Image (tube, rainbow, N blue to C red):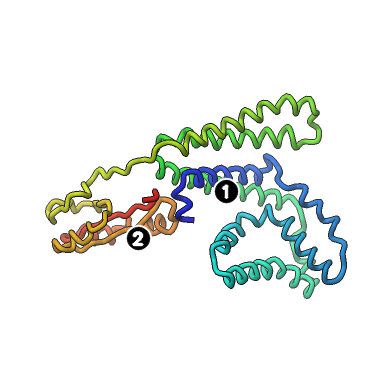
């Protein structure tokens, strides 16, 4: 997903998607309720009955499993045929294993938790990780496009959420009359159009120009010109490491990106620790940062 997350359209779109999933988990609106009614078609026996029962299980489970399977299927779409087979075979084994276990050990059914309020509470709790993911992607967007897009992108997410709230409150509730639905239909359309407007405003703005306020990457510094109190990251450029090496420096390069979770974890757990700061501020050491947040 690294290359895709260099695209503001993808980043903001995913942020909106995760916010929408959070509202669904919180019960603001419902998604794919009609799929659960497909169970009445599961009445065949024998091999074909088992086959179509499996197909039906996958279809009904799709709203729940899509966030987890999306990455695997996306990877499979760009892989060799044998990798595709292994991935889909693994998915098939995964979804059939609980059935196999319960059929072979029916006594386990008595130990499973009974349906109840805990299911609703767990579902609502799972909305918060989705909100966290949405917020993280909003931060990535700011890193991509600059702080000027923060307000417009936040408004885009806000109006999508308002649209979903209106949809769940006034269009998915059985008690709401046709007259009320017609009254709120223009409001729903306005909210949706506003979300599209602010979405386009966010992703179409000019890219943030990266400026290093500490050191000029075009100049090759001498050992005495680099302060030693903290790491002074110099923007990476082609052939720049070679120039420093020729002057006798040890060169450390941090290839990173805002959307790279591993990079951010590495920064917190390793690069920002006192031991590493001490090493990278030693005389004769230069730290270069190759930031690939934007496509370059």
Residue under the point 58% across and 72% down = 82
Tell me the SS state at disc 1.
Answer: helix
Residue at the spot of label 1:
130
> Is residue 181 toward the left or the right of residue 218 in the image?
right
- Kindly identify the residue that appears in the image at 68 percent across and 68 percent down: 92
280 over 210 or under it: above or below: below
Query: Could you tell whether 175 is left or right of 163 in the image?
Result: right
Crowd class of label 2 (few under 14; some 14 to 19; many from 20; radius 10 Å)? few
Of the pair 232 and 217, the residue shown nearer to us: 217
The residue located at (14%, 51%) in the rendering is 225
| Labelled pair 2, 1 in contact (Cβ < 8 Å) | no
Spatial CA span between label 2 and label 1: 27 Å
Q: Position of residue 152 (x, y in %)?
A: 48, 33
Asked which secondary structure carries label 2, the reply is helix
| Residue 255 on image: x %, y % | 34, 58
Q: Position of residue 115 (x, y in %)?
A: 77, 55
**Residue pushed farthest bottom?**
104
Q: Which mark is residue 270?
A: 2
**Residue 157 falls in which quadrant of the image?**
top right
Q: Quadrant of residue 56?
A: bottom right
Percent coordinates x, y for residue 156 in the rendering:
54, 35
Residue 74 sits above or below residue 197 on the image: below
């Amino acid at each position: 997903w690294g290359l895709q997350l260099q695209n503001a359209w993808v980043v903001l779109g995913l942020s909106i998607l995760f916010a929408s999933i959070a509202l669904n988990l919180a019960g603001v609106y419902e998604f794919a309720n009609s799929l659960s009614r497909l169970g009445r078609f599961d009445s065949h026996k024998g091999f074909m009955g088992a086959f179509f029962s499996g197909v039906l299980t996958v279809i009904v489970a799709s709203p729940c499993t899509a966030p987890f399977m999306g990455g695997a299927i996306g990877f499979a779409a760009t892989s060799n045929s044998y990798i595709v087979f292994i991935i889909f075979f693994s998915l098939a084994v995964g979804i059939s294993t609980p059935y196999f276990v319960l059929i072979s050990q029916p006594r386990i059914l008595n130990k499973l938790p009974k349906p109840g309020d805990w299911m609703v509470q767990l579902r609502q709790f799972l909305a918060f990780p989705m909100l966290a993911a949405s917020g993280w992607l909003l931060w990535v967007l700011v890193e991509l496009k600059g702080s000027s897009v923060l307000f417009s992108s936040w408004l885009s997410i806000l109006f999508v959420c308002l649209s979903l709230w209106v949809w769940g409150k006034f269009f998915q509730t059985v008690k709401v009359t046709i007259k009320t639905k017609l009254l709120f239909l223009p409001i729903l359309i306005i909210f949706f159009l506003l979300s599209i407007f602010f979405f386009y405003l966010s992703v179409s703005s000019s890219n943030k120009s990266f400026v290093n306020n500490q050191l000029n990457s075009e100049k090759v510094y001498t050992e005495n010109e680099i302060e030693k109190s903290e790491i002074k990251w110099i923007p990476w450029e082609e052939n720049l490491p070679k120039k420093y090496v020729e002057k006798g420096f040890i060169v450390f390069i941090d290839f990173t990106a805002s959307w790279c979770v591993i990079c951010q974890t590495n920064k917190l757990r390793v690069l920002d620790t006192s031991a590493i700061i001490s090493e990278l501020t030693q005389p004769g050491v230069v730290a270069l940062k190759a930031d690939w947040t934007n496509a370059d």
